[in-house]
Image: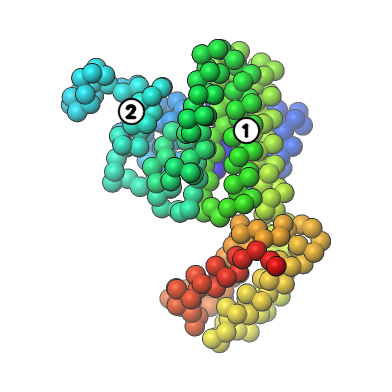
Amino acid sequence: MIIADGVRPDVLARYIDGGRLPALASLREEGSLSTVTSAFPSVTGPAYAPFLMGRYPGAVGLPGLRWYDRSGRIAGITGHSRSYVGSQMRFVDRDIDPASPTLFELAKPSFGALSVIGRGLRRQNRIGRSLAFVARAAATHFRGNVRGWLAIDRRVGEEAAHRLRTKRARYAFVALTGIDKTSHAEGQSAAIVGDALRIVDDTVAFFETYPDFRQILRHVRESEAIIASVLTEHAAERNVFPATLILMTNVLEEGQRIGEIREGSPGALIHLYMTLVNEYVYLAGSANPGLGSLTIEQFHALVDGALRRPT
């Protein structure tokens, strides 16, 4: 999930229509572009709660970036208040409702980039929380270096792309805040906002090349007749998963041979494999509660084995 923090729908549409955001234009063409209403308050941090927790920010303990604690639970030294703009940002994960899980807790391993909410992430999976990064962001802020935020956005996008290329991740949350920073400083119509949007587009473009999800889906769709025949033939037998694994491997190897699927891509492999599993479940019928002849443990072992980098 990529958050282009602070972009206005009309500005986004204008840049796409003008041909300046090709990756986002491709997503719009293949899917859709919709305007929705943000949660209240619609500010960086609290407005991330619906994406990461499936609940409104106030209901999970984030009524705003700054708020007063009427109960007096928060120490008086801070005026019984919170301000997540600064050092108190470290209290966000402690303040949010412990009974409401985050996606980081439900889908592991995950990583988050510039996410105000980070509960469930290990320290090494939090991009933008290191002391070096905090020092850089603080210097950029206090110097009034608006363009410096673009360099930070680009660095965050590159780091997120690198992690997706090299590590297994079930969920990734990447917030790019350059649009928010630059539009506050110079307005949504400023040229620098377009520069920030292009960084978002460059980050999105990563998904078109690594790990090539679209090409994988194209291979799967072209192979639908083969997949259906194999699964139909073996749906009632006990060797359906070895058969689908062989088919999956053949499709993957062909994609790697012609250079459209990156070798050793865990994301590509699992995406393709789950497509085959879904086909099997559909053909086998919803009455089948298990995984053919495999236990859950054997199924996981089979997937893990398939995820090894080719030798």
- Residue 115 percent coordinates (x, y): 47, 35
Horizontal side, residue 150 vs residue 121: left or right: right
- Nearer-the-camera pick, 35 or 102: 102
Q: Is residue 192 above or below residue 60?
A: above
Number of marks present in the image shown: 2
- Contact check, label 1 and label 2, Cβ < 8 Å: no
Question: Is residue 286 in view?
Answer: yes
Q: Which image quadrant: the N terminus? A: top right
Q: Residue furthest right?
A: 258
Q: Which residue is drawn at 59% across and 35% down?
A: 156
Cα separation, mark 1 vs mark 2, equals 30 Å
- Mark 2 sits on what residue? 63
What secondary structure is found at the residue carrying circle 1?
Answer: helix
Crowding around mark 1 (Cα neighbors within 10 Å: few <14, some 14 to 19, many 20+) is some
For label 2, count other residues whose C-alpha is less than 10 Å away and answer few (under 14), some (14-19) or many (20+). some
| Secondary structure state at the residue bearing disc 2 | loop
In the image, is 95 to the left or to the right of 249? left
Circle number at residue 155: 1
Judge whether 285 appears above or below 129 on screen: below
Taking 217 as reference, is 191 above or below it?
Answer: above
- Three-letter code for the amino acid on which mark 1 is drawn: Arg
Q: In this view, does 166 lie to the left or right of 299?
A: right
Q: Nearer the viewer, mark 1 or mark 2?
A: 1
Residue 280: name its quadrant.
bottom right
Q: Look at 33% across and 31% down and name the residue there.
A: 91
The image position of residue 142, as x and y in percent, is 51, 13
